[in-house]
Every structure is written in structure tokens, then in C-alpha cells.
Image (cartoon, rainbow, N blue to C red):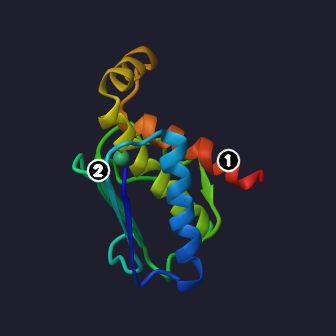
Amino acid sequence: MKLEFHCDGFQPVLVGWAEQTVRWFVADLGLKNNLIFELLGREDGTGHDGTATEGGLVEVVIDGAHAYPYLWAVNPKCGTGYVNNVTLIENAEELFIYLAAHELRHLWQWENKRAASTLLRLMKMTDETDADLYAIRVLSAFKSQ
Ligand SMILES: [Zn+2]
């Protein structure tokens, strides 16, 4: 697999760290398909955003003016199954880890459709719950390093 990492406007001091973190997720999830990861530094709505497409494009946006601590919660209009009001995010690094882990877990779900659908069925959860649970687990591991 090939990873292209682009950054525009994110905190310069964190760019190298962010790319290494994405590489860690790629290895942890065993992702095989090519991936383009875009990290942007300005978001007009909530101050952060994340999207992933099955073609392997992931976009994470974190506004430099985002307020912390932030209790992870997604607008109900965005879908069901998010694990809201559980995870306290204390800075931009933690928000990046959460968003990147969540979006890259969607790539894992698409690359491993049988395993993912079995997991979602047995655990009676949505793809968003699975992505949030992965993000919570990974963020917890990073915090305890
Ligand atoms: Zn999601």
C-alpha cells in the first residue's frame, strides 16, 4: 500500500507527528489499499470534521482555534451510533488521534467487509459505533504511554 500525506494549515509543529501517527494506524489496522490522507487546519462549523471514502481518501480538519477540553459528541443529524459524551479530548493531538482513528477504521471496515459485518451484527452496533470504539481504545492507549 502507498500512503500520500498532505497537510495545509495544520499546526506545523505537529505535521511530522501526525503523519507518523497515520502510519501507525495503517499498520495497526493492516490496511492494504492505497490511501490519500488530507489534514487541514481550518473548519467553519464545529471546529473539526472527518470524512472517509471507500476509494481511500481521508480528510481530517481541525481548526487552530478549536476549544479544549472537548467532550466528543456528534450532531444527531450526522447519523446514529456515535459514542457521544464519553471521551474527553484535551488538545489538538488527542482530537487528531480520535478523528484519524475513526476515519481509518472505516477503511478497515470496507477492506474487511465480511469480518466487519460479522462484528457489527454480533455486537448489534453500527459502523459509526465500531469506528468510535476503535478511536476510544487507541486514544486511551496513546494517553497511557
Ligand atoms: Zn464515521
The one nearer the camera, 101 or 35, is 35
The one nearer the camera, 103 or 43, is 103
Task: Give the alpha-carbon distance from disc 1 to disc 2, as whole Å.
Answer: 25 Å
From what the image shows, is residue 41 above or below residue 123? below
Disc 1 designates what residue? 140
Disc 2 designates what residue? 78
Classify mark 2 as within 8 Å of ligand 1 or not, answering yes or no.
no
- Relative image position of residue 45 (x, y in whole percent): 33, 72
- Picture residue at 58% right of the left edge, 77% below the top: 14
- Relative image position of residue 124 (x, y in whole percent): 40, 20
Name the residue type under label 2: Cys
Q: Is residue 16 visible?
A: yes
From what the image shows, is residue 41 above or below residue 29? below
Name the side, left or right, on which 119 lies relative to 139. Answer: left
Q: Nearer the viewer, mark 1 or mark 2?
A: 1
Disc number for residue 76: none
Name the residue type under label 1: Ser
| Element under disc 1 | helix
- Relative image position of residue 137 (x, y in whole percent): 61, 41
Q: Quadrant of residue 105?
A: top left
- Relative image position of residue 77 (x, y in whole percent): 27, 50
| Element under disc 2 | helix
Q: Residues within 10 Å of mark 1 (few under 14, many from 20)?
A: some
Q: Is residue 67 visible?
A: no
Residue lying farthest right? 145
Residue lying farthest front? 1
- Picture residue at 44% right of the left edge, 34% below the top: 130
Across the whole image, how many numbered discs are drawn on residues? 2
The one nearer the camera, 46 or 55, is 55
Q: Quadrant of residue 36?
A: bottom left
Name the side, left or right, on which 42 lies relative to 93. Answer: left
From what the image shows, is residue 24 above or below residue 41? above
